[in-house]
């Protein structure tokens, strides 16, 4: 008997069965643990913080704070873990795995973010595993190797900054097959999805963007490779620069929450609420 994927001429991993979607939804309803961003408006927009089992895509133009948010979430994850440990609600450390595809991870920025808190800088760094990624193939291989680490360590947060950097450059490279580039990228997204659900991760990925050709919309840009990304990320969070130090965070697409748009600002202490 010919399978449906053979009829449609697509790979098996591109077909998601209804019962799997229902199982994922029921799983998400039971989630409790989350990481707040550190800004009330930001958290209110996305439903109270970043939750386990969910995959967040953060996109926006330059100077909107995508990488800033990644650094801040490293601090927030460690801070949240320390607080829970003190209350004896958990026994193991909560570690962060950070894939850096643009060489923008800055340890010194973490030190700035904890200046007003009683956090041990060296202990913080020991809880963050950083992997520099130079190609899509390297990202796929690193994600596949990550599974063995997840089985041995209590890693709760997966950050990828940015997920489509190499896809963007490789899709424009005439020396590389377009089909091969798309195939590797789809395998990356599938692996992220599987790891997130299997190990109950909080997954946050930033994305490079391109202009949105649709007129009369508040969403000025869209993620590069959006036609592939939107099948895998449950939450789309749009960051927009307004003026001076005013920026908007907008929940564009969510499987459980309504769309919302609120102000925030970026300071030396990170993302904070903008008070009018």
Image (tube, rainbow, N blue to C red):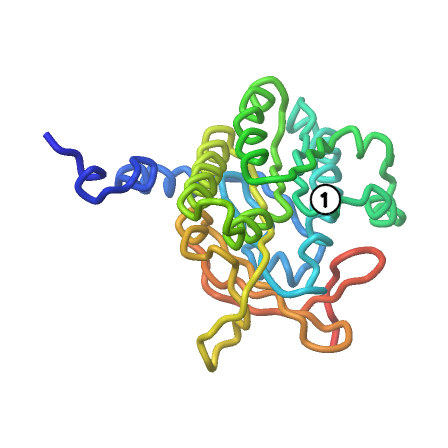
| Quarter of the figure with the N terminus | top left
Residue at 49% over, 53% down: 235
Q: Nearer the viewer, residue 55 or 4?
A: 4
Q: Which type of secondary structure does the marked residue at label 1 adopt? A: helix
Residue that protrudes farthest toward the left in the picture: 1
Quadrant of res 88: top right
Is 153 above or below relative to 124? above
Residue that protrudes farthest toward the bottom in the picture: 216
| Quarter of the figure with the C terminus | bottom right
Quadrant of res 4: top left
Task: Name the residue beneath numbered marker 1.
Answer: 76
239 to the left or right of 173: right
| Residue 232 placement (x, y as % from top left) | 43, 46
Residue at 86% over, 31% down: 122
| Residue 41 placement (x, y as % from top left) | 65, 63
Q: Which of 44 and 3 is in front in this view?
A: 3
Is 59 above or below relative to 2? below
| Residue 222 placement (x, y as % from top left) | 51, 64
């Amino acid at each position: 008997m010919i399978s449906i994927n053979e009829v449609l001429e697509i790979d098996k991993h591109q077909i998601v069965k209804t019962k799997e979607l229902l199982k994922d939804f029921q799983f998400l309803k039971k989630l409790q643990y989350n990481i707040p961003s550190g800004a009330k408006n930001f958290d209110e927009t996305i439903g109270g913080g970043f939750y386990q089992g969910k995959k967040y895509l953060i996109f926006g133009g330059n100077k909107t704070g995508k990488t800033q948010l990644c650094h801040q979430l490293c601090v927030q994850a460690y801070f949240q873990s320390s607080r829970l440990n003190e209350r004896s609600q958990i026994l193991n450390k909560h570690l962060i795995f950070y894939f850096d595809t643009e060489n923008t991870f800055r340890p010194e920025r973490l030190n700035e973010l904890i200046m007003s808190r009683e956090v041990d800088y060296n202990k913080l760094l020991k809880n963050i595993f950083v992997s520099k990624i130079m190609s899509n193939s390297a990202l796929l291989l690193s994600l596949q190797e990550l599974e063995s680490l997840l089985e041995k360590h209590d890693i709760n947060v997966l950050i990828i900054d940015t997920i489509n950097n190499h896809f963007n450059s490789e899709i424009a490279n005439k020396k590389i097959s377009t089909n091969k580039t798309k195939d590797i990228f789809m395998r990356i997204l599938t692996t992220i999805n599987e790891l997130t659900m299997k190990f109950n991760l909080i997954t946050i990925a930033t994305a490079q963007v391109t202009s949105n050709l649709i007129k009369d919309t508040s969403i000025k840009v869209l993620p590069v490779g959006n036609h592939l990304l939107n099948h895998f990320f449950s939450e789309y969070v749009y960051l927009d620069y307004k003026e001076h130090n005013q920026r908007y965070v907008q929940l564009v697409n969510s499987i459980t929450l309504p769309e919302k748009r609120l102000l925030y600002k970026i300071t030396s202490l990170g993302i904070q609420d903008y008070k009018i």
